[in-house]
Image: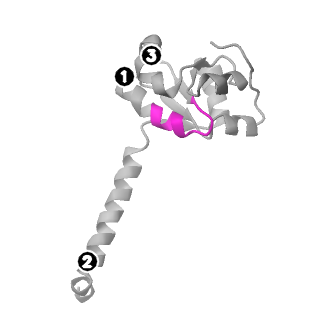
């Protein structure tokens, strides 16, 4: 007890930082990350919808087969195009996973129930030895 009294500032600092860390981990990132193999299973078993959040030039350079290109900046405005998929698994894809993780919370706020982010993005997809399709914008 004497230690706590003499070091109250350090104890409070440790408590606050620990609480903040716990709160962030409980809240999560707004979506559930899936690996390339988990994404493949969702696509094959549950007919998951793939949304590529990269810009058009990045998408045309190589994208997951059957993915739709909706750049992250226009996702909220174009979410109406996806309204029939609110109860279908939706996998958001970007180059590294950062944009897709942020976009998960946007779709969740709009009522999408099964939103996932491809962990590591297109880079991880390629690292797993999975194919990309070039050209043709969908």
Q: Is residue 106 left or right of residue 62?
A: left
Task: Kindly identify the residue that appears in the image at 46 percent across and 22 percent down.
Answer: 74
Residue 109 percent across, percent down from the top left:
35, 28
Q: Nearer the viewer, residue 57 or 67?
A: 57
Q: What is the secondary structure assignment of the residue under circle 3?
A: helix
Q: Earlier in the sequence, mark 2 or mark 1?
A: 2
Which label sits on residue 9? 2
Few, some or many residues within 10 Å of mark 2 (<14, 14–19, 20+): few
In reply to whether residue 25 is colored magenta, the answer given is no
The quadrant of the image that shows the C terminus is: top right
Residue 116 location (% of width, % of height):
52, 31
Q: Is label 3 or label 1 in front?
A: 3
Question: In front: 55, or 96?
Answer: 55
Please say if the residues under marks 3 and 1 sit with CB atoms less than 8 Å apart: no
Mark 2 to mark 3: distance in Å? Answer: 49 Å
Q: Is residue 66 left or right of residue 6?
A: right
Nearer mark to the viewer, of 2 and 1: 2
Q: Is residue 67 left or right of residue 89?
A: right
Number of other residues with Cα within 10 Å of mark 3, as a class: few under 14, some 14 to 19, many 20 or more = few
Can I make out residue 104 in this image?
A: yes
| Distance of label 3 from label 1 (alpha carbons) | 14 Å
- The magenta stretch is 93-103
Name the residue tied to disc 1: 111
Q: CA distance from mark 2 to mark 1?
A: 43 Å
Q: Secondary structure at mark 1?
A: loop
Q: Which residue is mark 3?
A: 78
């Amino acid at each position: 007890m004497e230690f706590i009294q003499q070091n109250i500032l350090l104890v409070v600092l440790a408590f606050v930082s620990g609480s903040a860390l716990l709160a962030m981990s409980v809240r999560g990132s707004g979506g559930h990350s899936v690996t390339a193999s988990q994404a493949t299973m969702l696509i094959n078993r549950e007919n998951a919808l793939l949304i590529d959040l990269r810009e058009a030039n990045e998408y045309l350079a190589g994208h997951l087969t059957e993915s739709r290109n909706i750049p992250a900046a226009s996702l909220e405005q174009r979410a109406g195009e996806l309204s029939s998929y609110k109860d279908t698994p939706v996998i958001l894809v970007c180059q590294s996973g950062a944009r897709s993780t942020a976009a998960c919370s946007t779709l969740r706020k709009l009522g999408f129930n099964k939103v996932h982010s491809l962990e590591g993005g297109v880079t991880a997809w390629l690292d797993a030895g999975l194919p990309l399709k070039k050209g043709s914008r969908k």
